[in-house]
Image (cartoon, rainbow, N blue to C red):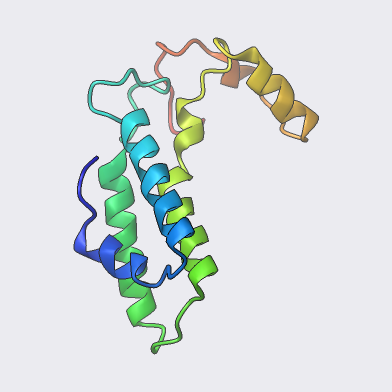
Amino acid sequence: MGDFTDAEKKLLMNVTDSRLRSNLEMIREAAEDIWAEDSTRVVQFYTDHGIKHSERLAGIVDDLLKANNGSALSSEEMYLLLAGIYLHDIGMQCDILRFPEIKANAEKLGAEFSSSSAKHADENYGLEM
């Protein structure tokens, strides 16, 4: 696993529950593996949303919290914020053609898919996706 950036470390200091901190480390590690440089991108030819992207977002969040006049988030709020940073683009790596049960479960929960979302993983997705 890569090292946390300074911004991530600063945000992590606000997660005081050791179980939540440990969980965040595992979430970040899983996201790092999913977005590894050598991993096959399900959504090809699209902006990279890997761990470097998450690190940039953590830096932005740190800056935003500084501008918040010191109003601290709770440990649980910071946990959810960091987990969201690491996981928000993971769905781009879900190939619904290879794993149709995931699509079926999502539809049961109310998700709707256009016919264009069923393209093959090796096709060029555009910004309109």
Residue for point 51% across, 18% down: 95
Residue 94 visible in the snapshot: yes
Horizontally, residue 66 falls left or right of residue 85, namely: left
Residue for point 28% across, 70% down: 10
Residue sitting at the far bottom: 69
x, y percentage for residue 55? 28, 52
* Residue nearest the viewer, comparing 109 with 112: 109
x, y percentage for residue 100? 64, 13
Number of residue marks? 0
Q: Quadrant of the N terminus?
A: top left
Residue 98 vertical position relative to residue 77 in the rendered view, above or below: above
x, y percentage for residue 78? 46, 66
Residue for point 20% across, 49% down: 3
Horizontally, residue 81 falls left or right of residue 29, namely: right
Q: Quadrant of residue 111?
A: top right
Residue 49 visible in the snapshot: no
* Residue nearest the viewer, comparing 125 with 13: 13
x, y percentage for residue 24? 42, 52
Residue 24 vertical position relative to residue 104 in the rendered view, above or below: below
Residue for point 38% across, 38% down: 31
